[in-house]
Amino acid sequence: LTRKTFKGGVHPPDNKASSRGAAIEDAPVPDLVVVTMGQHLGAPAKPVVAVGDGVKRGQVIGEAAGFISSNVHSPVSGRVVRVEPAPHPLGKPVTAVAIENDRADAAVDGYGLPVRWEGMSAGEICAKILAMGVVGMGGATFPTHVKLAPPKDRPPIDTVVINGAECEPYLTSDFRLMVENPGGIVEGLRIILKATGAPRALVGIEANKPEAIEALARAASGLSGVSVEEVPVRYPQGGEKQLIKTLLGREVPSGGLPLDVGVVVQNVGTACAIADAVAWGRPLTDRIVTVAGAVERPANYRTRIGVPAGALLERSNLKPSARKIIFGGPMMGLAQYTSEVAVTKSTSGILALDEVDSSPARGCIRCGKCVEGCPSGLVPSMLSVLGEAGRFIQMGEWDAADCIECGVCAYVCPAKRPIVHYIKRGKEALRQARAKGAAK
Ligand code: SF4
Ligand code: SF4
């Protein structure tokens, strides 16, 4: 059976072989964790602890500061030693709470105790998810409680999509989670179905992960309305809009969201975090992180948030030849200037690279490769030229806001133009201009 898929995309080398066999292992928890308040899209959380305070594992240390925001919890028990700006994976420092770990792991009441959630209403489930700090763990970190409660004027959600595509090269954290804890993902899926009222769910997994497809299919067997689907290997198959197109043939409109076509998409890691939060009283304070690339021992770590990247890289024996550290994968990941930057809820991987292409960018030769490859149907060449010239407002007319920052255009560009960099700057400038009413 050949399934139709989205337009555009590429087939970069997947480079997953080095870590896909690495079973999830618990990373040691250091003496000091530095937990940023910017764990999610939207307003950073507001710190609610002060220097000198004792905290327990799972205690709220940052409260959601607005509608698009989320709570942040302590990943250890210990004492708060600093509340101040610290390095953040997105670049600019953000307020963080540094906690000295007392190694007692004393947790808040109810932590890890089973909860009978079946009797909870949709509103109660969403409130629990907000309280427990669950955000999208596939990269976008959109607060999950907002995604599960669409505005009343939208069509009802008829399908939940669980995203197990993991199309980024090198990353295998979702793969290991699917193979090792399919039951947790399915429990999360049942909670999502209850919260959204959707009658059916599709789990989309790329064809290069047969063990994951089998594990999920077994765990979901007997659940009515749930089916596990193999999807073609093609980057960025894991983009929400691309996965919806592949699985359902539905086109999310320009400027729109999955809920505009009756769909909610949740990553497999998020589904598991929902189960932990709602069914087991465990706030989101850890996640699986792939460490790969220029390391002697590629691995998949279960690590607490707030652990510095350097500690995980050291445990994997970072090679002296490593020249660049990336949070995420090579297509969408972000280069880091310090290994002090700590793991957040969205850190799916830490990649060390020893080969860095430093050839200079040239002018566009109008080869059209970026246009052919763009999965969002944009004209990246034009966007890059406008961005380079600082004509950000005009980028809006070329639908810059629809760019999913997948990196395909920059990957295929023979002139090595930093297209995504220009588009990101343009999107930010547009957002600010729109907020001031200076652009449409
Ligand atoms: S313009 Fe955006 S969506 Fe299109 S290929 Fe480039 S990064 Fe991807
Ligand atoms: S791929 Fe690069 S050189 Fe080719 S049209 Fe796009 S921006 Fe221009």
Image: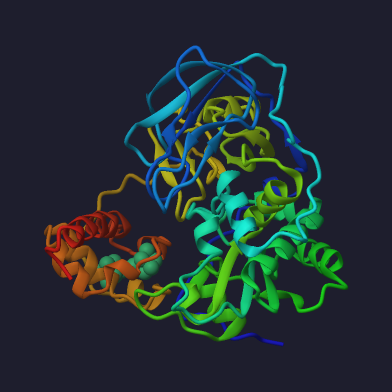
| Residue that appears at 77% across and 38% down | 112
| Residue that appears at 71% across and 75% down | 229
x%, y% of residue 246?
58, 80
In the drawing, does residue 112 fall left or right of residue 206? right
x%, y% of residue 163?
62, 65
Along the line of sight, the residue nearer the viewer: 31 or 407? 31
Q: Against 268, is 335 above or below?
A: above
> In the figure, residue 369 lies in which quadrant?
bottom left
Asked if residue 205 can be seen in this view, the reply is: no
Q: If the image is split into quadrants, where does the C terminus sit?
A: bottom left
Q: Against 46, is 53 above or below?
A: above
x%, y% of residue 83?
41, 21
In the drawing, does residue 212 fall left or right of residue 54? right
Q: Image quadrant of ligand 1?
A: bottom left
Here the colouring is rainbow
In the drawing, does residue 414 fall left or right of residue 161? left
Q: How many labels does the image show?
A: 0
Q: If the image is split into quadrants, where does the N terminus sit?
A: bottom right
Asked if residue 34 can be seen in this view, the reply is: yes
Along the line of sight, the residue nearer the viewer: 180 or 410? 180
In the drawing, does residue 192 fall left or right of residue 218? left
| Residue that appears at 59% across and 83% down | 248
> In the figure, residue 73 lies in which quadrant?
top right
| Residue that appears at 68% across and 37% down | 301
x%, y% of residue 195?
64, 65
